[in-house]
């Protein structure tokens, strides 16, 4: 059992690195794209069969929902970096203790988020000045959707484990199965049962519980060093400190981005319902682009963590540069493609020409800018692979959250145009990227030779 795992760890710390990273990232990329496409199916069904108001209601929750799911994804990223490090160092005892502790910690976090969704949805959406005509539907959607947070937490845990040991195909398979179920249930609940936004939310959480069950079942049945056993499920104090000290800042990094985006949503909500619906439709492009680029960030964290555990400085540096280059290229290709085919993309979600015109205002601004985010997010992933997440979190808070809030209440408040609102992404990414790259280089130079 250990010899097989050791062989895989060795293969990831030697060989053709650009090809290894690409082959490692490809299933992750497909998983992320499938997840985005399934989420798009939610909005497409709502937009075509329930109308623009329902689309605006679901769209009004997007930033709040992704803020909390981003925290879970960030926690999973911290778990990924730790397991990759122990896997690279062949410290299988710590790997197993970290894995079992992580499963329980993420489950607890998912439960806490469910409670928040049930009792805090309406105050949060009211704080964001969600339109009165869509508020009740938006609250209903959030309450149902947040019931799936424990399942989402456990799936992210399993995905982190498999990514850390170099197996990205199993999560892709499980996500594909649950995604097909999601689409089928969407059509059934919305078209046949006329459940509107409640049907979309219900379809989402049922598919999330299926993906979580599949990935956990595989981990419990596995005979490898990373397998789960009920008798070993406990939170060890040492591992708890490691997981939380790396995972919480990583989760908060993602959460901070979305907290800042809450203020962007606040700015969007100051326009009419057509602009809100157009922004909601166009914002689906963000998930598509970011998640494709995100596959390379996961690769960066995994490869850097694994080679950090193996003591291979050269491949740490190479992994950092290759993953950032891949992410930049993916962002540029997708961004300009959306710029060229934006109306066709937006027509997936709505047949309303006015909503499509409003959505194009966002795509015209964001399309050429997506690739810039690679310099920031790639550096954050690299720092996570080295076990550093507190300082990057502070940098993200300052460069993204504080800066964006200031921008909304100064630059946007002065010009009051949608273009002046979207420009804040470019400047916040650039400012944060400068510091994050400096910090990664500083940490790398301190590594023992």
Image (cartoon, grey):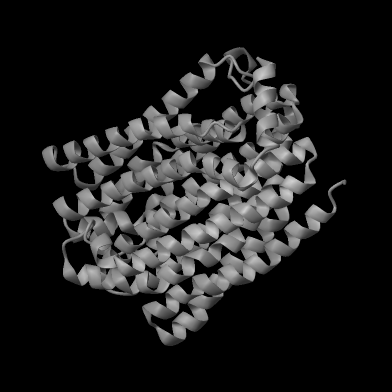
Q: To which quarter of the image does residue 420 belong? A: bottom left
Residue 405 is at least partly visible in this image:
no
Q: Is residue 418 above or below residue 320?
A: below
Q: Classify 247 as above or below 339.
A: above
Q: Position of residue 182 (x, y in %)?
A: 29, 37
Q: Position of residue 207 (x, y in %)?
A: 34, 33
- Residue plotted at (57% across, 39% down): 76
Q: Residue furthest front?
A: 16
Q: Is residue 263 left or right of residue 145?
A: right
Q: Is residue 238 above or below residue 441?
A: above
Q: Residue at x 40, y 54 (%)?
A: 288
Residue at x 53%, y 21% (from the top left corner):
219
Query: Of 321 and 357, which appears nearest the observer?
Result: 321
Q: Residue furthest bottom?
A: 414
Q: How many numbered circles does the render carry?
A: 0
Q: Nearer the viewer, residue 97 or 368?
A: 368
Q: Is residue 281 left or right of residue 153?
A: left
Residue lying farthest right? 449
Q: Picture coordinates of residue 405 (x, y %)?
A: 53, 71
| Residue 434 visible in the current orientation | yes
- Say which residue appears at 39% left-offset and 83% top-offset: 416
Q: Which residue in the rendered view is the most extreme toward the left?
A: 192
In the drawing, does residue 322 fall left or right of residue 64? Answer: right
Quarter residue 304 falls in: top right
Q: Residue 266: which quarter of the image?
A: bottom left
Q: Quadrant of the N terminus?
A: top right
Q: Nearer the viewer, residue 190 or 303?
A: 303
Image coordinates of residue 239 in percent, x first then y, are 72, 31
């Amino acid at each position: 059992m250990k010899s097989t795992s050791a062989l895989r760890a060795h293969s990831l710390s030697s060989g053709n690195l650009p090809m290894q990273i690409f082959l490692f990232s490809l299933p992750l990329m497909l998983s992320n794209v499938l997840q985005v496409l399934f989420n798009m199916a939610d909005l497409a069904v709502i937009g075509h069969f329930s109308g623009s108001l329902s689309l605006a209601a679901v769209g009004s929750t997007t930033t709040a929902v992704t803020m909390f799911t981003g925290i879970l994804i960030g926690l999973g990223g911290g778990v990924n970096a730790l397991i990759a490090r122990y896997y690279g160092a062949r410290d299988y005892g710590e790997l197993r203790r970290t894995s079992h502790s992580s499963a329980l910690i993420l489950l607890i976090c998912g439960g806490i988020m469910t409670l928040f969704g049930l009792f805090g949805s309406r105050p949060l959406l009211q704080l964001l000045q969600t339109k009165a005509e869509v508020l009740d539907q938006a609250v209903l959607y959030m309450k149902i959707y947040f019931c799936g947070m424990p399942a989402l937490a456990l799936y992210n845990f399993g995905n982190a484990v498999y990514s850390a040991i170099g197996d990205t195909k199993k999560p892709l398979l499980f996500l594909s199965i649950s995604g097909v179920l999601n689409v089928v249930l969407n059509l059934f609940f919305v078209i046949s049962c006329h459940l509107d936004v409640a049907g979309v939310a219900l379809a989402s959480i049922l598919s999330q519980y299926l993906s979580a069950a599949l990935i956990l079942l595989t981990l419990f049945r596995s005979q490898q060093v990373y397998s789960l056993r009920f008798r070993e499920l406990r939170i060890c104090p040492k591992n708890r400190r490691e997981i939380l000290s790396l995972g919480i800042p990583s989760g908060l990094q993602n959460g901070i981005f979305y907290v800042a985006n809450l203020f962007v949503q606040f700015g969007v909500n100051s326009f009419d319902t057509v602009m809100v619906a157009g922004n909601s439709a166009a914002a689906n492009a963000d998930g598509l682009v970011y998640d494709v680029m995100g596959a390379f960030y996961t690769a960066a964290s995994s490869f850097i963590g694994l080679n950090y555990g193996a003591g291979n400085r050269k491949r740490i540096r190479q992994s950092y540069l290759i993953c950032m280059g891949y992410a930049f290229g993916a962002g540029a290709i997708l961004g300009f493609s959306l710029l060229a085919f934006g109306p066709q993309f937006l027509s997936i979600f709505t047949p309303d020409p006015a909503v499509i015109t409003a959505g194009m205002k966002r795509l015209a601004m964001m399309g050429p800018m997506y690739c810039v985010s690679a310099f920031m997010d790639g550096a954050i992933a690299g720092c996570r692979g080295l076990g550093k997440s507190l300082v990057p979190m502070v940098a993200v808070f300052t460069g993204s959250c504080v800066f964006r809030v200031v921008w909304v209440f100064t630059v946007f408040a002065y010009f009051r145009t949608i273009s002046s609102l979207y420009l804040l992404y470019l400047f916040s990414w650039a400012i944060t990227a400068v510091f994050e790259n400096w910090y990664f280089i500083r940490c790398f130079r301190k590594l023992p030779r």
